[in-house]
Amino acid sequence: ILNVEQSPQSLHVQEGDSTNFTCSFPSSNFYALHWYRWETAKSPEALFVMTLNGDEKKKGRISATLNTKEGYSYLYIKGSQPEDSATYLCAFGAGKSTFGDGTTLTVKP
Amino acid sequence: EAGVVQSPRYKIIEKKQPVAFWCNPISGHNTLYWYRQNLGQGPELLIRYENEEAVDDSQLPKDRFSAERLKGVDSTLKIQPAELGDSAVYLCASSLSRLGGGWETQYFGPGTRLLVL
């Protein structure tokens, strides 16, 4: 069983704060790393898929980096807004996708 | 493009009762996944289909869970009989052709929230 860990488990920030969280995964036999956002009462939504060491992806105020050699990915949110409140899941693909437990972000107005 | 459709959205049943969940994937997606998500945890794969074939059901509790994907489109996941520990969110997802490496982005439905009393 692959161990995919996300930290922190939860995060409370004020509107306008920038924040980041981590996904750690096995560094061997890497295929892909996915980030999903899951808002309450909605479907999980794909943010990024990252496949190469050193990959950096950006979507608006959200960006992600990937280090396959040391087995981690960072997700950054610049200037958090209340609508960014959600659970952010990473999924490590090595034959099949294994999900972390997520980081739940709450942005207070 | 319509997304992944799941029904029902919510279900409350008493233990030992049967329950079934339905999923309609995105048109053209031949890979379909069923996940279970317990509170505070990430989605756990129950079964993956490539067209009609279940290619990974290693995590499916086969004593009480069953699934089918007739004609390689819609899918049904059944629990009989349900236990208290089955309370969770059941997610369906679909993706384009499976290359076997976890590359593909999965598109999720809204899930069915099951409460077993």
Image: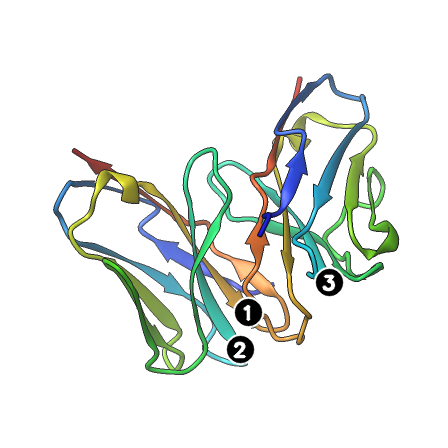
Mark 3 lies on a secondary structure that is loop
Distance from the alpha carbon under mark 1 to that under mark 2: 5 Å
Rounded to the nearest whole Å, what is the CA distance between mark 1 and mark 3? Answer: 18 Å
Return the residue at label 2.
A31
Q: Position of residue A105 (x, y in %)?
A: 30, 43
**For the point 76% across and 28% down, which residue is it?**
B82
Percent position (x, y) of residue A13?
18, 42
**SS under mark 1:** strand
Choose mark 2 or mark 3, whichever is in front: 3
Query: Is label 2 in a helix, a strand or a loop?
Result: loop
Residue B46 rendering spot, x and y as whole percentages: 70, 50
User: Is the Cβ of the residue at disc 1 closer than 8 Å to that at disc 2?
Assistant: yes
* Front-most of residues A6 and A107: A107
- Which residue is label 1 attached to? A93
Q: Residue at x 53, y 77 (%)?
A: A31
| Label 2 environment density (alpha carbons within 10 Å; few <14, some 14–19, many ≥20) | some
Q: What residue would you read off at disc 3?
A: B30
Chain of the residue on which disc 3 is drawn: B
Badge 1 density bin: few <14, some 14–19, many ≥20, Cα 10 Å: many
